[in-house]
Amino acid sequence: MNDISFLDNNYNPLFVGRNYTYIPETQSTNLGLKKLIKAESLPEGTVISTGYQTRGRGQAGTTWESGRDENIMLSALLYPKFLTVANQFLLSKAMALATGDFIHEFLPHQDIKIKWPNDILVSGQKICGILIENGLRGEQMDYSIIGTGININEVFNDKSRTSFKGITGLDYDLRDLEKILFSCIEARYLQLRANKAAISSEYLAALYGFGQQMRFIDKLKNEDFEGIIKGIHQDGRLIISIGAEERLYNLKEVVQNPVSSLRM
């Protein structure tokens, strides 16, 4: 197969990835970055990347499974002190958009959507998961660790997941792709600082199932129902309307069909 490199001079981030460490194998890049934060002062944009995680984690205690040296697995450190604790979900929106931007660079003709809160789907199949862990100081954000796993060269047998190679048949240089991802993260992060309303608007426009009648499963009530995603609460909860009723759900309290069974 061809080895594809897209790196050029257009991708030159100011700070994301400038302090970069690659580790062939680690428990978890998020855990590794957390340990470093406790041990030393790190510049904003510090990145730890790995070829394999032995304890990769996803949202709400789930696991992230990935082949060795086949996919992007990294964590980036940001200091979003301009955000309050109450509106910290804005960072999740920005990072989901950044990853969507990155994927669109390579798969421009595909249907790319954000599955709440921040998984990325391509034509209904999961291609990326994001785990954000925040450190708080009073009512303000202190730091954020953005853990990102993107399926690149691994080919999956099940239909719930896909990858760049699974779609194009091509092999990709992971280290080159990371640099483009850094630029996308940085661009959306800077946009978040300047225009929070635009981030929220674009997030809703890219949200899978937004404004559509869909089937859901209420995990708290063990109940199937049909509803419409109306938006996202400031605290990140999903707003679903059922006729005149509106319900708010936290992560893992509701399952969205049909892609709700995708693994992270």
Image (cartoon, grey):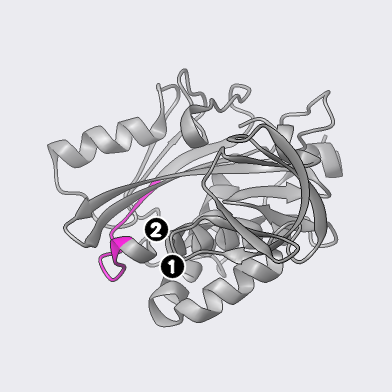
Neighbor class of circle 1 (other Cα within 10 Å; few <14, some 14-19, many 20+) is many
SS class, disc 2: loop
Closer to us: 38 or 164: 38
Q: Is residue 139 visible?
A: yes
Q: What residue lies at 33% left-to-right and 31% top-to-bottom? A: 31
Q: Which residue is mark 1?
A: 189
Q: Which residues are magenta?
A: 76-85
Q: Amino acid at mark 2?
A: Val
> Is 21 above or below relative to 79?
above
- Counting every numbered tag in the picture gives 2
Find residue 99 and report its horizontal and vertical position in percent. 59, 55
As for residue 81 lying within the magenta part, the answer is: yes
Q: On the picture, is 189 further left or further right than 31? A: right
Whether residue 259 appears in magenta in the rendering, the answer is no
Element assignment for label 1: helix
Identify which residue, 52 or 188, lies in the foreground.
188
Seen as rendered, the residue at the extreme top is 54
For the residues labelled 2 and 1, the Cα–Cα distance comes to 10 Å
Name the residue tied to disc 2. 16
Q: Position of residue 75 (x, y in %)?
A: 42, 42
Under mark 1, the amino acid is Tyr
* Residue at image point 58% right, 35% down: 220
From the viewer's perspective, tell me whether residue 217 is left or right of residue 138.
right
Q: What is the x, y in percent for residue 200?
A: 55, 72
Residues marked 2 and 1 touching at CB (< 8 Å)? yes
- In the displayed image of the protein, which residue is found farthest to the front? 244
Secondary structure that dominates the magenta span: loop
Residue under the point 45% across and 24% down? 24
The numbered mark, 2 or 1, whose residue comes first in the sequence reads 2
